[in-house]
Image: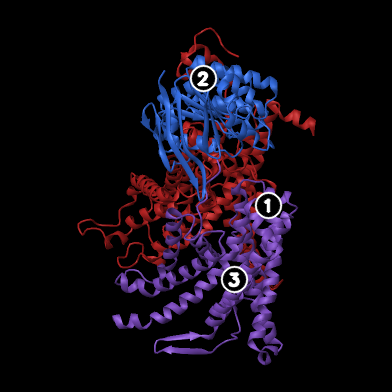
Amino acid sequence: MGFDFYIAILPQVLIDGLTLGFLYAVVALGYTMVYGILELINFAHGEIFMVGAFVGTEVLLLLQATGLLEGMNPFLSLFGALLIASLFTGTLGVGIERIAYRPLRKSPRLVVLISAIGVSFLLQDLVRLVEGVTRGAFFLNSPQLFTTNFQLTEMAILPMKSVIIMASAIIMMIGLSLFVSKTKWGKAMRAVAQDQGTSALMQINVNKVIAITFFIGSGLGGATGVLYAQYFSTINPFIGFLLGLKAFTAAVLGGIGNIQGAMFGGVMLGMFESLGSAYLEPLTHGAMGAEYKDVLAFSLLILVLLFKPEGLFGEAVKEKV
Amino acid sequence: MEKLKALLSNQNAQYAVVSIYLLVASLWLHYATKSIIAFLMLLFSFLVLYYSNKIPTKTRVIVGVLIFTVLLPLASGGNQYYMEVASNVGIYIAMALGLNIVVGFAGLLDLGYVAFFAAGAYAYAIFATAQANNFMPDWMQFPLGGEWFWPFLLVGLVVAAIFGILLGLPVLKVKGDYLAIVTLGFGEIIRIVFNNLDKPINITNGPRGIPAVAQPELFGYQFNTSTHYYYLVLIVIAVIIIANKRLEISRLGRAWIAIREDELAAQAMGIPLVRTKLLAFATGASFAGIVGVIFAAKQTFIDPTSFILMQSISILVMVILGGNGSVPGVIVGGAIITVLNVSVLQEISEWIQQLNMSGVISIPNELDPSKFQRLIFGVILIAIAIFRPMGIIPAKRPEIDLEKVKELDKTLPQTGILSQVQQGGKSS
Amino acid sequence: MSNVLEIKGITKRFGGLTAVSDVSVNIKKGSITAVIGPNGAGKTTFFNMVTGFYVPDAGDILLDGQSIKALRPDIIASKGISRTFQNIRLFKEMTALENVMVGMDTQLKSGLMGILGNFRGVKQEEERVMVEAYRILKYVGIEEIATHQAQSLPYGLQRRLEIARALAAQPKVILLDEPAAGMNPRETVELTDFIFRLRDELNLTIVLIEHDMKLVMKLSENIHVLDYGQKIAEGSPEEIRNNKRVIEAYLGKSGEEEAS
């Protein structure tokens, strides 16, 4: 295919990359918030995202089965699905912290990380089990709420669902930023992230702050799962792992612990991946194609950790001796 | 209870326990055609030996070797099922012992360990089939015969070690949790690359895998039964155990554990971090490489699905469950997890399928227990982390013979920093 | 006597904060030098630069006339600077003897192949290491806990063990970061004698950070005072005791904080 073709598809590649990037960005927030406070890579965060996708989709399917979905305003049904999914995953996140992380707060990091990997695997199979028993299959097709497409050029469309995803993601991020900077609990969160011991002395309930952090991070992750299901329409219990890794990459890229950074990291990674899948083949004369897009993402993660481990927007922190 | 304890710390009692245990386990194994419990019982006889501390170590080692070289094959009476399970268990134990050096000794959480296994397996599979003709010069003809298996054990080792160093050089500068993620990423990269290296030049045959890998041959003798591989794996395990033991008490083992315990203090004591970690990485990797070569020969077919992240996690679970850094622990962990994976779950699922077919009960396919690997691993990992972070048999530092040290203290000349101190017994 | 360690105008900044600013210190061979100052004065940062954990933003550090600035900590250790840590950093799960054996690592030659092959040279080296580690424990006076796990030891012994481990590296200069912290008066007196012994019998040069002023005054020939990252005074114990700026730094102009 000629040069003109690759130019013509560029707008579409960018739209896809941007949508994907916003999905990564919101999930990255969950990693960044938990890491900021506990210095723990919450390995299970990708699975929380996946659970959110299933819960939200199940809500929509329920509405569909009862015939309510047709008559409802699609924005309202999406909002309902997002709300229920994020409440569910928020609670799940708090539960995970309580059961699998809190007892280990004084343990070596290796032990906590192992517990986190355990939670991650447990959730994958639990969802598969529940779906398998109730539906006889472990993948799920989500009802599509927004099917309109705006034709931009001959070769590029802007789907309504992309617009919805980007808008929701931006609203969630602004909401989080305001929460962290303006509210009492947001300030407590920042205090605990700075220094747990001192915060405890200042009458801040550290456990509660950590629980709130998990609730919000997991709630955002779960909501993103619902958006993901709208975008890709088919979900399975294993979508969380890879997406979680990439969202983590996005968090590292933007500087872990940094909310704005996570957003930039997510968008950058989404773009990078989308451009990679579209143009790797012509660039390598067919030797490599879209199947290497995950390799690109992981290579980016490794490069960032090697050369700028504090991320593009983070500050270098020196280990205490 | 106390009485029992006292009784069991008597040497003769221990001899009696070991003998009765071995007798029961062997007879059971011999007369039951497919009992995984009997098999496990005989396998775990090494634990009984391990805890029989009143029997001299030399005797215990000899008995242990005899159990696995003579008793187990004999008791299973040529039953290839047991030999197949045993060699599978052995392959995973060998890998877990390799990973133990990386995770257990040096404390480096490597989630991409299976990549080294893959490197070894592909190194042999590509050259022991016609696959290599696709990219090697015309005057060389492939496949290589089965007698090439032996040098390829070394090739697998070297290739995996090179992979380990190439991966380690950049990665080991990354600290702690990040290392886990980065190694995971690297493991996935390797798998994806092997999965796609059928073009532009067909090197790995991509997702279709490489069939008909040559089986080992020694002086014209073909290795083609499970029993053959059993012995092969046994030798490799013995080598890896000896290596683990020697490393554990060596200067290197101490440096690794020092790094695990406190990286900064280790560095302040003059231990070069990256080089020491790299040695751990390469040593662990090379063992996986050797095992990969054996795996490819034994299966006669490999494809990228054997080298997924789940495998890396399985091996990690073996190490953590058994006891991070503990050689007997890792063997136990390896045996439990492999038997769980390849036998127990499969047997239950076959049994359920039979029930399903005969119409006794109806259980949906999704409930097939052989698919619950992740759930079971997940629960094991969380439970171990919370309740027994040191594993089933916690690692302990090998005991130092202080009497011998005191003896040497009297004979060896004074060296090092204290040689400046005037003789005259300034000792307190 | 000649200077074994020359520190020339080193500076370390963290973000906007200058932790150590243009500090120069000369340390004579075989001397005992103290670095003192209020909390947060930059003393530990100073040690961390000398031992290579931080790279100075400016200035130079010379060991026997050769620059060791920007070398890795392990290389600096092998060149003869050894240290202890403010908040004891032993290898907790190892025995006391093994902790000391780790300290000797820079002098060992065994390689991977030799260890795997269990070569004779390796076995001999191991024996030698074990015995020497035992002798160092004996020298420090804690040989009876040789086979105890480091984490099981009482505080005072842990401090001694950390010094033993530092000695094992055959240093020319040893840096002690608050060696008397948490010790009772009797232990502190023992420590004083012990530090004199290290200097006299082993020809060591000793640099210490310490808050216990009685100990500092008794031990050191030379004292350097840091405050807010800057060196505000240098001199003999007598000179420092009467230095106005030092008194001010410690007591504050309003006299809120108390010395020692």
Chain letter belonging to callout 1: B
* Alpha carbon distance from label 3 to label 2: 63 Å
> Crowding at label 2, few (<14), some or many (≥20) Cα neighbours within 10 Å?
many
Residue for point 42% across, 17% down? C1
For the colour red, the matching chain is B
Q: Amino acid at mark 1?
A: Ala
Q: Secondary structure at mark 2?
A: helix
Q: Which residue is mark 1?
A: B383
| Discs 3 and 2 carry the same chain letter | no
Residue for point 69% across, 48% down? A198
Figure quadrant of the C terminus of chain B = top right
Total labels: the figure holds: 3
Q: Which residue is mark 2?
A: C131
Chain C image colour:
blue
Q: Amino acid at mark 3?
A: Met
Q: Residue A266: percent from the left, percent from the top?
A: 50, 68
> Is residue B255 in view from this perspective?
no
Q: Residue A238: percent from the left, percent from the top?
A: 56, 68
Q: Going by the image, does A241 lie left or right of A303? A: right
Q: Secondary structure at mark 1?
A: helix
Question: Residue furthest toward the left?
Answer: B139
Instruction: From the image, state whether disc 1 or disc 3 is nearer to you.
Output: 3
Q: Amino acid at mark 2?
A: Val
